[in-house]
Image (spheres, rainbow, N blue to C red):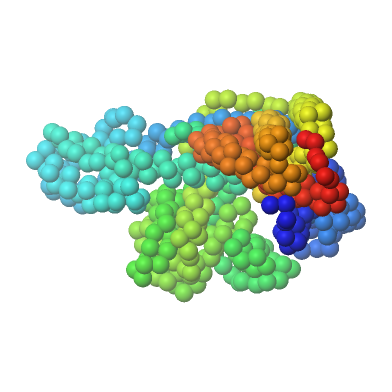
Amino acid sequence: MLQIPLWKRIVIWALCLAAFLFALPNAFYDRVETHNDASEAVAASAIAPTPEQTAALGMWPDYLPSSLVNLGLDLRGGAHLLAEVQLADVYADRIDALWPQMRDALRDARDEVGGIRRTQSEPGVLAIQISNAAGLERAVAIARTLAQPVTTLTGAGQSDLDISGAGDTVTIQLSEAERSATDLRTMQQTLEIIRRRIDEVGTREPTIQRQGDDRVLIEVPGIGSAEELKSLIGTTAQLTFNTVLNRTTDPDTPVEAGQALYPSESEPGTYYLVQTTPVVSGEDLTDAQPAFDQSNNPAVNFRFNGAGGRVFGDYTARNIGRPFAIVLDDQVISAPVINSAIPGGSGIITGNFTVEESTELAVLLRSGALPAELSFLEERTIGPELGQDSIDAGRMASLVAMAAVVVFMVLCYGWFGVMANVALAVNVLGILALLSVIGATLTLPGIAGIVLTMGMAVDANVLIYERVREELRAGRNPVRALDEGFQKALSAIVDANVTTLLTAVIMFAFGSGSVRGFAVTLGIGIITSMFTSIFVTRSLVATWYAWRRPKTITV
């Protein structure tokens, strides 16, 4: 086992060198961060870099890796919010939007149902009273013509409305399947809107995730205060449908009064010249869902309210064959061609979409404004000074832990302990390198995971060396003792690390926030510690033995 092929040694030390290179930028964090910010700004700009950007780009060589470990909220400072989405408001809005359609449909059957009026009911319920109770069955049948199938897999085959009649009153509300589908869409839309608004200000690695059925966790490192974050989330994105005048790749295309040149979000380098006065705005859009067209290709169904539907129907009838631009925050997210008139306020957008693209477009179409009010249940501001204190404390804890481990290994195992400490250093570099490459966020619990990994990393070496001691006491020669020590300890090392890795996977799958941060660093640390204990330590021992050729060894 000590006879390691040359190619395998090259692979092992190449991985160690890669770990060093990818971990290196974290030793010059501020310089590399400044370089990365300037690089992103230059890449996003169509003009030459400014002198300040050029100086920032020179702060780190382009031929070296520049990925950094992202610092979490507790290390960088920033704002933390826990918000509750008022899903019941969405139900009420959907039912309120249904009343004009129901009123118009019942008016056409006035001879059978008589007069109609909306009566008082709880939010999310539409109660319509008719003057001719004998026409109740007819009124219920008319109401059912407005129902649509639920568009989710779990609600397949079910209607989106529960319709019933009693006495002289028709009652309409969303079905349970539609409420579940609406909850999913609303939460998805809320997350997308919040993410887009926060990304606009260039914050680094925000955490925006759903918690439970109706809550959203928002953590943004580097932002001034929770109030500033709430103000940012509360702003309204502008969604409009505009007439397309021209499509070009020239960002300097002349623009006349009443026109604007907007970049395409899906086609980099493409610009659309549009009329600034919108045909309809996002306020008139009531829903947009991914769907499939008649050829079973991914598409997007959309629906306007009554006023928006009439305007859009007249516009499409006059502009068949021409594109129209869907503009969100001064960017064209799509520019479909009008194939036919779209009366009634409902239509379909087709194109060369994938299923993912049609789903994303549907979410973006619904992203004009937050779909429901957010109630902030928890808000917290962490200052940068406290974050720096956390970094210093974490660094000190790591150094103390490493120093204790290093001293222990040298005192207990002598020269073999030194080789174990070299493998431990490689292990820490490997953790930092992997965290940098995958863009993971390091938090205080994550630092705890790294400290714990240090102890687990040398634990594997302890198992190996104790096995070697047993073989030496049994009278084995040095080569046989080392060989047997590594072989017999392997199963115990793998068993211990695999069970701990499974624990880390479970914590990541079912945990959130700081628990996930701990699970990520623990899991990565287990992988790197297995590599260093099984391969790096063995390679070091084999190299040392081939060089010294001792007659006896003392572990």
User: Nearest the camera: 417 or 238?
Assistant: 417
Picture coordinates of residue 372, whole percent (x, y): 47, 37
In screen coordinates, is 134 left or right of 58? left
Residue found at the very far bottom of the displayed protein? 321
Q: Quadrant where the C terminus lies?
A: top right
> Along the horizontal axis of the image, is 140 left or right of 7?
left
Most distant residue in the left direction: 134
Q: Position of residue 355 (x, y in %)?
A: 45, 60
Q: Which quadrant would residue 71 be assigned to in this image?
A: top right
Query: What residue is shown at x 84% (from left), y 63% (from top)?
Result: 48
What percent of the width, then of the height, locates residue 197? 62, 44
Query: What residue is drawn where x is 52% and y is 52%?
Result: 364
Q: Is residue 421 visible?
A: no
For residue 208, side relative to residue 17 (left or right): left
Residue sitting nearer the eye, 111 or 287: 287
Quadrant of the rendered image containing residue 347: bottom left
